[in-house]
Amino acid sequence: MLRSLKEITGYTLQETDDVIGTCKDFLFDDGLWVIRYMVADTGSWLSHHKVLITPGSLGEPDWQTERLRVKLTREQIEACPPLDSHAPISREYEISYHEHFEIPFYWMGADFREGMPGMDGVINTVDDLPDIEEEAAVADEPSGEEPGEGRLRSAIEVMNYSVSASDENAGRVDDIIIDDSNWVIRYLAIDTGHVIPDRKVLINTEWIDSVSWEKESVFLDLTHEAVLECPPFDPDEAVNREYEVRLYDYHGRPRYWEKKQP
């Protein structure tokens, strides 16, 4: 199911019957647009306050009570490597984190491709994940980052980026829509209010031409007119397959759910 990250951010995090903090942010791989971690704020009970939690350790959100289950104990969270909230997440930190929880290194090819654990711990196979060969190719490209660093970006920061199409401003990123079966970022929700008031549209991440992280701008592989006139998105309504069909047919793009798996 497609979910709004803006909605989940701020949810109470609960371990069994014990509240352990709140969801503050999500970190995603800027090459594949896949969520790698949730940033949890543990409040005052933990000295380093913020910790990372992988999607595999998250349960189903309770939309009525705005709570998100975490399949880790307080003891496990308290013992995890301390996170410096004022510094980028280094590969060295990720290695220590993954070794602590005995999680395979996703950057070595280990990912959720073998399936996502359900609430009962059973691994359920999932499809439509980004190609591992594509990830390797992206990783080989110059990124301007120091060797050994990851490519993790804050979802909260991106939600304020400007959006350009055909060299014209098309709005700003208002929300990020993820597929909760594999934590792939499927869409950016674009607010076009500077041109058409109270209108939002969805743009698939495959339609992004480039991103300038320094200028905080997203550049689309779409015309300005195509963005402004595509089917409107209502954030109060669930993103269903009927809407997605209309959206893809409007842009004349191949539907991601119909692509053949390798």
Image (spheres, rainbow, N blue to C red):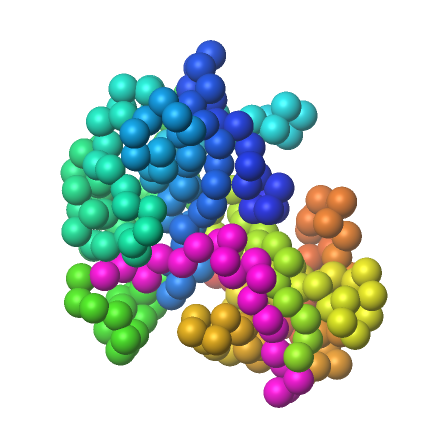
Q: Nearer the viewer, residue 242 or 167?
A: 167
Q: Position of residue 8 (x, y in %)?
A: 57, 39
Residue extending farthest to the right is 197
- The percent coordinates of residue 223 (x first, y second) are 67, 83
Q: Is residue 86 visible?
A: yes
- The quadrant of the picture occupied by the N terminus is top right
**Along the viewing direction, whichever of 212 and 186 lies nearer the viewer:** 212
Note whether 163 is above or below 168 in the view shown.
Answer: above
Q: Position of residue 64 (x, y in %)?
A: 67, 25
Residue at x 83%, y 66% (from the top left corner): 197
Q: Residue 91 appears at what percent x and percent y?
A: 21, 54
Please provide the residue range marked out in magenta: 149-168
Q: Is residue 47 left or right of residue 190?
A: left
Residue at the (32%, 26%) spot, across then down: 46
Residue situated in front as seen by the camera: 99 or 163:
163
Residue 262 is at least partly visible in this image: no
The image quarter containing residue 202 is bottom right
Instruction: Quadrant for the C terminus, please.
Output: bottom left
Residue occupying the point 27% across, 25% down: 78
Is 167 part of what is drawn in magenta? yes
Q: Is residue 187 left or right of residue 149?
A: right
The picture quadrant where one finds residue 192 is bottom right
Magenta highlight on residue 249: no
> 257 above or below 104?
below
Residue shown at the point (55%, 32%) measured from the top left: 11
Horizontal arrangement in the rendering, residue 145 relative to residue 35 (left or right): left
Count of numbered circles in the view: 0
| Residue placed most toward the observer, 139 or 15 | 15
